[in-house]
Image (tube, grey):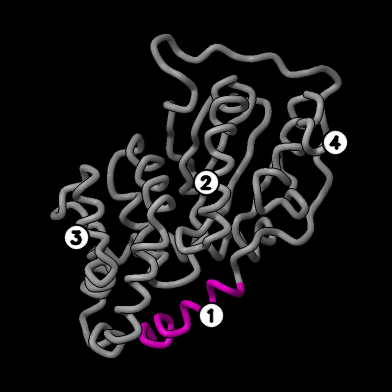
Amino acid sequence: MIREAILSASVLALAACGGAENGGEIAGPDEPIEAVEAPEGSTWSEVVTKTDAGGYLMGNPDAPVKMIEFSSLTCPTCARFEAEGMPVLKEKYIDSGRVSLEYRNFVRDPLDITAAIIARCGSDASFFPLTEALFANQQQWASQGMQNLQAQAAQIEQLAPDQRFNAIAEAAGLKTFAAQRGLPTAQTEACLSDPANATMLTTMQTESSQDFDVSGTPTFIINGSKVQNAAVWAQLEPVLAIAVGEPLPEDSE
């Protein structure tokens, strides 16, 4: 029932936000991986393609180091990683053509599903800017959404299924948020009204748990292996450095 899911969302956020607890070792190359030039007139972080798994891949599709991030838009730890890690990840690793990043939504509650549908509603090129904006403003819209949903859960449950995520978006101010960033409201409402979008996200979450043993966010997979205890950038970068064959960052030695 959507009412129970909405009312339990804050508990889910506490239980499932914090990253992977265990995983395999990440092997490094025999020699440092050389940089690969991006297509003329662009940088690799501007190259975005949608994957068969439903994720969005940023960077060189043929990068020798392939990283998958499983992340939740309502997870504060994920927002911290976005703020601390993404600028360096793009500049040092993705724009060098050595590392690609595939972002897969790992939804944990109805508000998370709503935000994820909106982030995925535009073009492939708009996915990462919308996702970054949602993380940067997470405290505002997520707090507003949770507060209003606590009061409106019973009314939302009574709505037709194709109206519920529109109501959640309205409660969190996400329709206005998206419109201010170039996504027309009519397009947002159409995406939120299509039940296939929510079904796809919940299916992706289930498959992530089954295929990669994902139980918390953020979780990172590098070349097929889950990274151990790397919920923040300071923990993840040494693993990436090993993967591309570079010396460890000074503050991790």
The alpha-carbon separation of the residues under discs 4 and 1 comes to 36 Å
Q: Which residue is tagged 1?
A: 11
Residue 111 at x, y percent in the picture? 38, 69
Magenta residues span 1-15
- SS at mark 3 in the image: helix
Front one among 228 and 160: 228
Q: Residue drawn 80% across and 30% down?
A: 248
Q: Nearer the viewer, mark 4 or mark 3?
A: 4
Mark sitting earlier along the chain (4/1) = 1
- SS at mark 2 in the image: helix
Mark sitting earlier along the chain (1/2) = 1
Mark sitting earlier along the chain (1/3) = 1
The alpha-carbon separation of the residues under discs 4 and 3 comes to 49 Å
- SS at mark 4 in the image: loop
The type of residue carrying mark 4 is Glu
Q: Which quadrant: the C terminus?
A: top right
Q: Residue drawn 29% across and 68% down?
A: 172
Q: Which residue is tagged 4?
A: 253
The reply to whether callout 4 and callout 3 are in contact (CB within 8 Å) is no
Front one among 92 and 20: 92
Tag on residue 82? 2
Mark sitting earlier along the chain (4/2) = 2
Q: Which residue is tagged 3?
A: 189
Name the side, left or right, on which 183 lies relative to 139: left
Residue 12 lies in magenta, yes or no?
yes
Mark sitting earlier along the chain (3/2) = 2
Does residue 66 sit above or below 15 in this rendering?
above
* Residue furthest out toward the bottom: 154
* Residue furthest out toward the front: 251
Residue 142 at x, y percent in the picture? 38, 66
The type of residue carrying mark 3 is Glu
The alpha-carbon separation of the residues under discs 3 and 2 comes to 27 Å
